[in-house]
Image: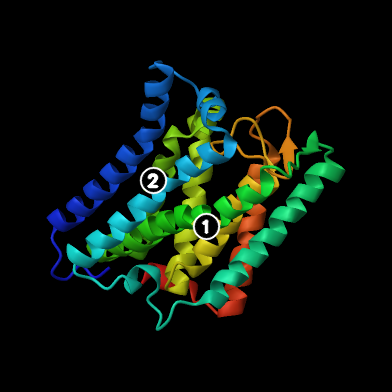
Amino acid sequence: MDSKGQSFFSYLLTLVFTGISLVLSSSLIGTIYSFYSRQTKFKLEDLIQFYGKNVFFLLQLFPFVIALFVLLFCVRFIHKQKIKTLFSLKNTFSLKHLFVSFLLWGILLFLLLLIQFFILQKPIKWNYSSESFWILVLISFFFVGFQTLFEEILFRGYLLQSFSSFFHKKWIAIIASSLLFGLMHFANPEIKIFGNFILIYYILTGVFLALISILDKGIELAFGFHFVNNLFGTLVLTNNWQVFQTDALFKDYSKPVLSWEIWISLFIMYPILFYSFKKIYKWKIGEIFA
């Protein structure tokens, strides 16, 4: 996002319109429930029981589709920028980079699952339901794709590039966009369970995704990572406390605690993935401080 010719008002309008579209479309879930149940106070479990898991999951994801198109509309007609610049600053959008990231992080996630099941012997049970799983697959691959694409375009495309233009320092842009990415998850049920400390996980994940986006000059790697990460949480392994409640293949019945898996992801698996990308694409780390 080139700041030349852009005004602060343009950025403000874009963020306001995108935020309003996301909030209003998200509020319809509770509004419809309140209208039919005549209850103004309700829990997540009430909504899941009312809509059913798959329908509720779809309704959770649909606002991101609306917000994505609002964001793209604003970039094209308020900023008068080419939409492609949000996806990649390379000549073409690289599907190969997306698939490499998707595959590598997917393999690491499955390895972590095997460790949890066979070594730690966590209470992970087979949860397959033929009636709902294949519908869930269709919903997930299409709408989770839109949800993750929206977040990557907003944080690793629009905001990261905008902050880079404003501050003229890529490392400041990385920190600023990552803090906002972490704060976006403040309403997640995980915050109530683990406390605000879990925000560190989201912020550091945002830093990792911003780093690889800056160095790769596009969101392809970040999108591949984010997409398979969310698919894993909706199709492969679920639990009773995360934001997306689905009929995944496996269900974890262990008590929600800040376990070692989170720190293994942050301080071992992320560096392994980053080093792999660096070797494959021959990055120059100094570009971050240029």
Q: How many marks?
A: 2
Picture coordinates of residue 250 (x, y %)? 74, 42
What label does residue 63 carry, if any? 2
Badge 2: residue crowd in 10 Å (few <14, some 14–19, many ≥20): many
Picture coordinates of residue 101 (x, y %)? 59, 67
Picture coordinates of residue 23 (x, y %)? 32, 39
Residue 109 visible, this angle:
yes
Residue under label 1, please give it.
142
Q: Identify which residue is drawn at 35% across, 33% down.
A: 27
- Closer-to-camera residue (34/97): 34
Q: Which amino acid does label 2 sit on?
A: Pro
Residue found at the very far bottom of the displayed protein: 91
Picture coordinates of residue 64 (x, y %)? 40, 49
Tell me if residue 127 comes above or below residue 161 in the rendering: above
Q: Identify which residue is drawn at 75% across, 48% down.
A: 113
Residue 176 visible, this angle:
no
Of helix, strand and loop, which one carries label 1? helix
- Closer-to-camera residue (153/72): 72
Q: Could you tell which of marks 2 and 1 lies nearer the N-terminus?
A: 2
| For residue 224, side relative to residue 30 (left or right) | right
State the colouring used for the structure image.
rainbow
Tell me if residue 219 comes above or below residue 133 in the rendering: below
Q: Identify which residue is drawn at 80% across, 37% down.
A: 125
Of helix, strand and loop, which one carries label 2? helix
Q: What residue type is labelled 1?
A: Phe
